[in-house]
Amino acid sequence: RFIPIGNIELSKPGNMRDQLGRILAIDHDSAWVAISAYEDAFAVVRVGRTQHVYGPNEEIVEKAKIVHAVYKTSDIRGTVWSMCFMRTRCSMDEYYPVVAMIINRKGSDANDLSMYALAANDGGIQYLSGYSEPGPLALEIAEIPQLDGFGLLFRAGDILIVDLRDPKDICCTIRISMTGSLVGEQISVEDSCRGLDVDDDVAACALLELRDSGNNIMMDDSYMAIDGADNPGSMKSRVICSWSWEPDAMRGQPRLIFCLDDGEFHILEFNWDTEGLKVLPERVHRGLPCKPLLWMDRGMIAGFVEMGDGMILHLEHGRLVHKSTVQNVGPILDLAIADYHGEKQDQLFSCCGMCPEGSLRVIRNGVNVEKLLRTEPIYQGVTGLWTLRMKRTDTYHSFLVLAFVEETRILSVGLSFNDISDAVGFQPEVCTLACGLIADGLLVQIHSKGVKLCLPTSYAHPEGATLTSPVCVDWYPDVTISVGAVGHDVVAVATSNPCCLYILRVRPLSSLQYELYETQHVQLQYEVSCISIPEEDSRLRTSSSAFGGDFRKRKGNNSAAEVDVRMFAVIGTHKPSVEVISLEPDEAFRLLSIGSISVNNALGAPVSGCIPENVRFVASERFYILAGLRNGMLLRFESGTSKDQYLPVSFYKESFAPSLNTLLQLVAIRHIGITPVGLVPLRDSANSDIIVLSDRSWLLYASRHSLAYSSISFLPASHVTPVSSVDCPSGLLFVAENCLHLVEMVHGKRLNAQKFSVGGTPRKVLYHSDSRTLLVMRTGLTGASCSSDIVQIDPNNGILLSRFKCELGETAKCIQIVKIGSEQVLIVGTSKSTDRPMMPNGEAESSIKGRLIVLSLDTLGSPHECSSFIPTSNLSSSSHTGSFPEIVGYANEEFSSNSMCSSPDDICYNQIQFEQIAGHLRSLTHVTFTGAVLAVYPYLDRYVLAAAGNTLSVFGFVNENPHRMKKYAVSRTRFTITCLKTYASQIAAGDCRDGVLFYSYHENLRKLELVYADPAQRLVGDVVLLDCETAVVSDRRGSISVLSCPGLEVSESPEKNLAVQCSFFMGEIAMSIQKAAFKYRLPIGDEADPVLESAYNCVVASTLLGSVFVMIPLTSEEHQLLQDVQERLSLHPLTAPILGNDHAEFRRRGIPSGVPSILDGDMLVQFLELTSEQQQTVLDDGSSVKAPRRSISVFQVMRMLERVHYALN
């Protein structure tokens, strides 16, 4: 988490144009900061840091503080477009610092370059000079690194290199023209730019159309920015939309990479010699225009696309080579929620991006796994699962050990899993409790009767013994073994009656002859429930490592200090407790550290079932111990070590006296499930991330503070083990539904999303449950036959199955599946014009016509049985060869492009012609309207509602015949209706100005009646009905509200307005709202609580910025409790907004007074990431709560938040 160390207030909160806060610039020494308003004002701030104040014993008495001095001016008289600091030849005793600014003076058609500086004598900001060059409009100013006094002036169509060494006498030295053709003509460099003659008005108009992300979004044909056409407006090309300097350029040779608005990437190299400044241009790539660009270390360049996926590029031999993709799902124009086939997991099908980067994304929750292999369901009764190497230095695993109730089997790891149990030597007719590699070539099996040491034969492994049968040695105790663990050169086993702990080691007697012998035998007070011996990863063994790998060689933060750490093991006991014991061969049994497990519920009574099921030592920034309990809880223990010691004193070999600091502190508790918790590391190292198994699989991030984890997008599994082979180096084997599942976890991806490029802009998506396919409405197609269509897509692989083309010049606006008798049809609403369907005031355009089309779904094909993650066809109907299907979020991600930059490993999928692979959706009938049909929806299983312009119509089908459509009723609103939803007999219509309107239909009178109206004017984005009386509506100002019918006591009011129950300012425009139910089993920590299966009737909203908001209902008591917690979190230093903003003011923006606010889950979830001590500190801080202070239990808050977190994951 970022921690603010200084807060400099420059202006009061608000959106006034002359308030500071729009543009920020920092000088090269990070000592000065310049901040401008939109117009008329800017300030420079000197920022410094005081020194620490030390006491007599060199302790810090007072920490360093941020000091600052602010200098403001309001004498700019214009709009600030860009600014930067400049190093000039001015004496620091006269003017320092100097700021260059691009300013549009009021009433001027051109932008000026103006120089301002802070005068040393009076400390005021002074205007030094101005510069205006005839020609295109100036857009931005930037300083050239290493060339003091020279700057780049970016204009619409060219770049000027200006000499600012004397800020009072500015001159232009070089002009770089970018007026070449769009096919990639090289830019030209001219030594002088005097005498240019370009129409400034035309350039200004072009810039204003282009600026502020206006390429696609502001030039559309519909009622609001994102709703309309996909073709960019006619604008001036060859304008620089992003640029970045090379961070580690050679001395005296700075390089700049920039991207033009047509997708061309160029690099400019600047050289200074005796003849002056020279510029060498080079074109390095052609692709999608990026905003912005970031040149990183080692030639890596990050480019971000506005409405498509960004990319990571690498500069190689004068060309940019694609390395990976940066996912961007925004804008999400529509979404559909469906169950993941056969796995009972929710997933979202979303329409993302706009032409030409439109795509269909399958978004699932949690960490993504790629499913590679699934066996037949023949593995019933698995009790254990392990993978073993033959040598510690081996890259890949060699053996897979499967333990059953009364059997153990060993399979080879490779292309095929063959049974090699006899060649390894493990005892087959017993249940293996634990196994491992004790030394190179020597495997150990622990079962209830004893311990078996095995040397496999060459049949089991090429480096095994060249014997006909494996070499085996057994060790038997007098009593039954309950648990055990295998480490490097050591075996630890425990018995239950009596409670004893045995430490075993191995020694060679002769060639191929070994002996297992007992080194320690201790009787314990409590039974041992689990044992874990930390891994010592030889591949990570380095003294310079800050943590991880060779933690036994590390002491403190000084990596040069190497000291020996005792070998140790972590055990869990029935006390219950977590204990660390020494395994040093030359020492007697020694307890190094202990942590007692004591967890109380909200009433203060101890929680039962707190016996550790699994424990694990983790070496991260600080060492800690994880304990998974049998009641489904996960605990984290830490030791109160000082900063100069990585481990407690008792862990080091030079420490002989018992240390006083041997207690482990319980710092974090989480209810992670309802079944015993298992801990399995992803790899054999002490700093590895960990898979946590309970009734669901989670991935725990080892390097995070407290307990931070995400759900894994996979079936509930009983066992898991990492498996590494040549064909699958990062695999995982899960045991689920009596099958073995080989998967590969995909790391480094922000989203668990599968992508299919569709060509054009996907506007609407529906999930057809009968055929298990998607129906997608597309616009902005570039084919000659049509610009809009409806397509059926297989969500498993992106194959296009069937299609309906709209007429030439007709655009589909909405789709819905309707059931007529026993037959399903698809209703499509269209506009037969490319003009806007409404006027700027919200009224419908009377000149536009629309159609309501009925399509038959009887001919829908079912998806073919094929691989779920290999795209085989292109969804684009045009011949554009650059839009190939992609899989996003998988390790074997491929990228196809027609640009001059491509990876040598790219795979280009063959483009299949549309007519050869797709059927056709058959039209049954259609009706023509006055006005574009923007919304349709089924009603009462026998009617169809259609909104055309400001007209709401009710249609039915005579004798349930889809060919015969009849209009039954009509009602009109003041403004255009943009969305429709129904629930039972209730109708909700979204008026683009008047908000949500509730209608009812009287079948006997064939009449639509307005029942309730929105209490305020609202620019409706979308609406959904939770029940007959409650609607959730989003507006285009970034808010979402819950409206309901008023109570009986006010139902006679003539206004008949809906009541606003609660609201929330998202800061993003939600264009699609869906109702969903999340079913889950409650994780419990009390035997008194029943194990319930519950469901949240949630609301899922998707936004234009690519966010997905999930809202769940709470009781009034839960809401009040969490509201108090939210208020405390919003002001506590650990969890407050980093910039010091007022959280409550932001989330209530635009909400009427007296209306409750929806709670902010992102703020509340921070509570789960705090340690127990920090949680208690937050709740004890009552200064943030305006109401009288109330006592809040950590257990109560955690329980409530965990249930919500558990359900939504």
Image (cartoon, rainbow, N blue to C red):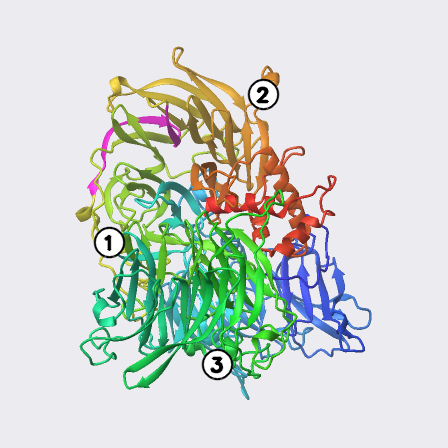
Residue type at the position of mark 3: Thr
Element assignment for label 2: loop
Numbered range of the magenta stretch: 919-939
Q: Report whether 1052 appears left or right of 956.
A: right
Reading the image, the residue beneath label 3 is: 542
Reading the image, the residue beneath label 1 is: 867
Secondary structure mostly seen in the magenta stretch: strand
Q: Report whether 598 appears left or right of 633.
A: right
Element assignment for label 3: loop
Q: Report whether 374 appears left or right of 344.
A: left
CB atoms at circles 3 and 2 under 8 Å apart?
Answer: no
Residue lying at the far right of the rendered structure:
122
Q: Quadrant of residue 222?
A: top left
Mark 1 → mark 3, Cα distance in angstroms: 43 Å
Residue lying at the far bottom of the rendered structure:
274
Q: Residues within 10 Å of mark 2 (few under 14, many from 20)?
A: few
Q: Nearer the viewer, residue 299 or 985?
A: 985
Residue sitting at x 49%, y 23%: 998
- Residue 1050: image location, x then y, percent: 61, 18
Figure check: 989 above or below 296 = above
- Residue 1020: image location, x then y, percent: 51, 35
Q: Earlier in the sequence, mark 1 or mark 3?
A: 3
Reading the image, the residue beneath label 2 is: 1047
CB atoms at circles 1 and 3 under 8 Å apart?
Answer: no
- Is residue 708 one of those drawn in magenta? no
- Is residue 920 one of those drawn in magenta? yes
Figure check: 1137 above or below 1068 = below
Residue type at the position of mark 1: Ser
Residue lying at the far front of the rendered structure:
478
Q: Earlier in the sequence, mark 2 or mark 1?
A: 1
